[in-house]
Amino acid sequence: MPNMLPPSRPQRTLAVAQLSNSLGDGAYYVTSALYFTHVVGLAPARIGLGLTVAWAVGSVVGVPLGRIADRRGPRGTAVLLALATGAAVASFLVVRDFLPFLVAACLYATAQSGLAAARQALLAGLVAEEERTAVLAHLQSTLNAGLAVGAALGGLALSAGSRPAYLGVFAIDALSFLLCALVLLRVPAVAPAPAVRGARLEVLRDRPYAVITLLNTVLLLRMPLLSLGLPLWITECTDAPEWLVSALFMLNTGAVMLFQVRTARSVTGLATAARAIRRSGAFALTACGVFALSAGSPPRVAVTALVGGSVLLAAAEMLQSAGSWQLGFGLAPAGRIGEYQGFFGSGVTVARTLGPLLLTALLVGMGALGWLLLGGLFLVASYALGPVARWAAGTRQEPAPVSVV
């Protein structure tokens, strides 16, 4: 699948780094919950509490870590944070109680959040502004390919069900971040950004950018929707077979892997980004309406509705991703890319932290009406992003040359 790889060598090296740790992450994602309950012996409620606290810490610390990447150089910062993430994963191997688990989880979430911001700053230094969305699409395809393969490895560990199998998965994930750090050392160094006048964390005072981040966080609720909302809906509210949960995950991963690059080609500036996000909101609303039809339907009808809704949701995800990348980078001032991306990336953390509570209340608690309310929320947020992006562009010292419509 050559379409997954970016054209130039530095960009391909970034893709290899992305692939290396996504393989380990894919295995980690499908086994971590059972590892912490069956091997470590923690109660599910304590695991949920620990991860919520950890990701809350990570979302806050990601901004100053992004600032460090701007000032000290993104490549060296990314390498150190990749090593810190690997060390955090390795520490899970010796965790036997809640407090050490909480400390390790906070280190993991902090390093992951900072690594994401540093990588974005590194990409900004290596790729021309007009090419960033296309390159990010390639990286997203690579990410999904790695997650899919990693999830398959995790599935083997789940089938074995033994302590050594689980420990092997965590060891692979830790080593994958070590490999990521080594690969990042092969990327050309990017000079630290010169000092910029203003507050030390200017992004916290940038109200238009904060509103964009908030609206984008609403759209990112599609992430826990795929990993938690749909599985709960399928098992609790429909007569569809449980194996459909994994099938829909594979469908989403494969679609993004194959079509994200093609989808992102239409996004070339702030105007096209706003248009893509509006289309994503329409697709998301339609997907939610189709998902709602699966309740109380015969199994064959339910499966058809769930598959159709998942196709629409994948289209919404690819459009929203491409548009949000353009807005997140295009509205960040030069010299503050890491800082701003650290803040923008906190939306992922917030969506994953608060999303499960909201989705459970809407979907399991309200049924079909909850799906329609969720779809309406997606649509409103997607249409609001255009005017807010126009507001943000007008507050820049050097407004984007393309108007937002």
Image: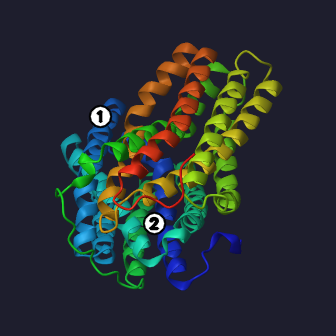
Answer left or right for 2 relative to 100. Answer: right
Residue to which mark 2 is pinned = 21
Q: Nearer the viewer, residue 215 or 397?
A: 397
Is 251 rendered above or below residue 15? Answer: above
Q: What residue is drawn where x is 51% and y is 48%? A: 30
Please tell me whether mark 2 sits on a helix, a strand or a loop: helix
Q: What residue is drawn where x is 26% and y is 55%? A: 63
Circles 2 and 1 in contact, beta carbons < 8 Å: no
Q: Quadrant of the N terminus?
A: bottom right
Determine crowd level at label 1: few under 14, some 14-19, many 20+ residues with C-alpha closer than 10 A.
few
Please tell me whether mark 1 sits on a helix, a strand or a loop: helix
**For the residues marked 2 and 1, what is the alpha-carbon distance in whole angstroms?**
25 Å
Q: Is residue 105 visible from the viewing direction of this image? A: yes
Is 99 rendered above or below residue 301? Answer: below
Q: Residue 202 sits in which quadrant?
A: bottom left
Q: Nearer the viewer, residue 11 or 70?
A: 70
Q: Residue 55 sits in which quadrant?
A: top left
Q: Residue 89: where, in percent of width, then height?
A: 33, 59
Residue to which mark 1 is pinned = 49
Is 188 rendered above or below residue 372? Answer: below
- The amino acid type, in three-letter code, at marker 2 is Asn
Determine crowd level at label 2: few under 14, some 14-19, many 20+ residues with C-alpha closer than 10 A.
many
- The amino acid type, in three-letter code, at marker 1 is Leu
Q: Quadrant of the C terminus?
A: top right
Q: What residue is drawn where x is 19% and y is 64%? A: 197
Q: Residue 119: where, in percent of width, then height?
A: 39, 67
Q: Is residue 35 visible from the viewing direction of this image? A: no
Q: Residue 169: where, in percent of width, then height?
A: 45, 59
Q: Nearer the viewer, residue 275 or 48?
A: 275
Comes first in the chain, label 2 or label 1: 2
